[in-house]
Amino acid sequence: MSQEGEHADSAVYRLRARDAVLGGQMLFVAFGSLVLVPLLTGLDPNVALFTAGAGTLVFQVVTRGRVPVFLASSFAFIAPIIYGVQTWGIPGTLCGLMASGGVYMLISALIRWRGVGVITRLLPPIVTGPVIMVIGLVLAPVAVNLATGLNGNGDATLVAAGPAMTVSAIALVVTVTVSLLARGFLSLVPILAGVLAGYIASIPFGLVDWSGVAAAPWLTMPAFVMPEWNWQAVLFMVPVTIAPAIEHFGDIVAIRSVTGRDYLKDPGIDRTMLGDGLATSLAAMLGGPPNTTYSEVTGAVTLTRAYNPALMTWAAGFAIVFAFVGKLGALLASIPTPVMGGIIILLFGAIIVVGMNSLVKSGEDLSEPRNLAIVGLILVTGIGGLSFSAGDFTLEGIALAGVLGVVLNLILPRAAIRP
């Protein structure tokens, strides 16, 4: 049998008890990144575990058990969620995140109607690349503040600067070292390794408080939060969704190259997009962060050559069970903020690089006046926090940058403008 044939055969959905350990391993790979988003944004990590598991199961139903992916917290929404929680509170922000899931669903319907080409023409890399960069650049001050012992806004000291910078540096160095030098399975969990190293380093400084862990029950109900209608949060989140929705294509192409199955055709990119959208809206309905496919899990699939999508069913089941372990949530909440700060310096920088790489791979000439205008205005608008208001209607920052990029791409002439 050819290698492609072996890939195709092993990628068939088979739910077997003997695969439970492999499924647990997939959750372990995603765990560090999964809980990082709620810890940074003020959402409940146990809820994030539950919605990641439930969202993965919804995705599998929509895609008919074809695709071996695990869905969990999306980094692209960290900055928007932080801003939303500060501005409208968690319930209002969740309303905006539900709308983000609706954007995925609309894109899915558009693809089914007109094909993938309509999306790539509407949202080319010249738009999505700089929007992704803006997300990382807006987050940069938050990362530095947390790494130096301040809160996210930088207006309050949580930990003395000396211990905070030592702990954050250890977490950062270990994360980078593992990502660069580790081999095999360890290379797939650099974030988990960095968190563990930073956590251990925090203990001698007295930064870890275990009282919450001791007081927490073993079994508890996750702190689910229902969304409240807030149209300003909706208008803010909808443009932010553009970039991660487009990234979804890259995720599906990546897992296609690993398994040898063309998921763009079967089950179809419209179904995978719909699965992401439904999972994201479900998460927002319960108080969890938006869902996205995880590249770490794709790496684990590559390493283990375990292509059976049912492994993700096991991973989802374990995530749902762990969501009801109260001491786990309390343990995660005890992680000092400098540990998170050290790691997200790298992660937020990586978001910027992803956007840059998207532009570079597109081959666009950025000195050409049209491209220069689009990229330059997106960056300055987003990073500068420009705001546009009309009555109660407001667009600013990342959201305004995304809308502006789409509009400029549609209205600016494609022929080079020469003096």
Image (spheres, rainbow, N blue to C red):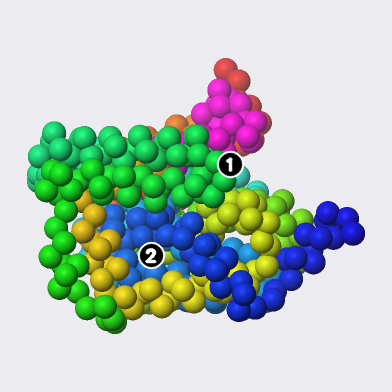
Dot 1, crowdedness within 10 Å: few (<14), some or many (≥20)? many
- Tag nearer the camera, 2 or 1: 2
What segment is highlighted magenta in the picture? 348-372
354 shown above or below 265? above
CB atoms of marks 2 and 1 within 8 Å: no
Q: Residue at x 43, y 76 (%)?
A: 320
On the question of residue 112 being in view, the answer is: no
Is disc 2 placed on a helix, strand or loop?
loop
| Image quadrant containing the C terminus | top right
Residue on which disc 1 sits: 125
Point out which mark residue 169 bears. none
Which of the marked residues, 2 or 1, is nearer the chain's N terminus?
1
Q: Amino acid at mark 1?
A: Pro
> Camera-side residue: 140 or 7?
7
Q: CA distance from mark 2 to mark 1?
A: 25 Å
* Residue closest to the eye, 376 or 28: 28
How many circles with numbers are drawn on the protein? 2
User: Relative to the observer, which residue lies in front, 47 or 26?
Assistant: 26
Tag shown at residue 289? 2
Type of secondary structure dominating the magenta stretch = helix
Circle 2 crowding by C-alpha within 10 Å: few under 14, some 14–19, many from 20? many
Q: Is residue 158 left or right of residue 128?
A: left
Does the rendering let one see residue 351? yes
Name the residue furthest right: 1
Q: Nearer the viewer, residue 311 or 133?
A: 311
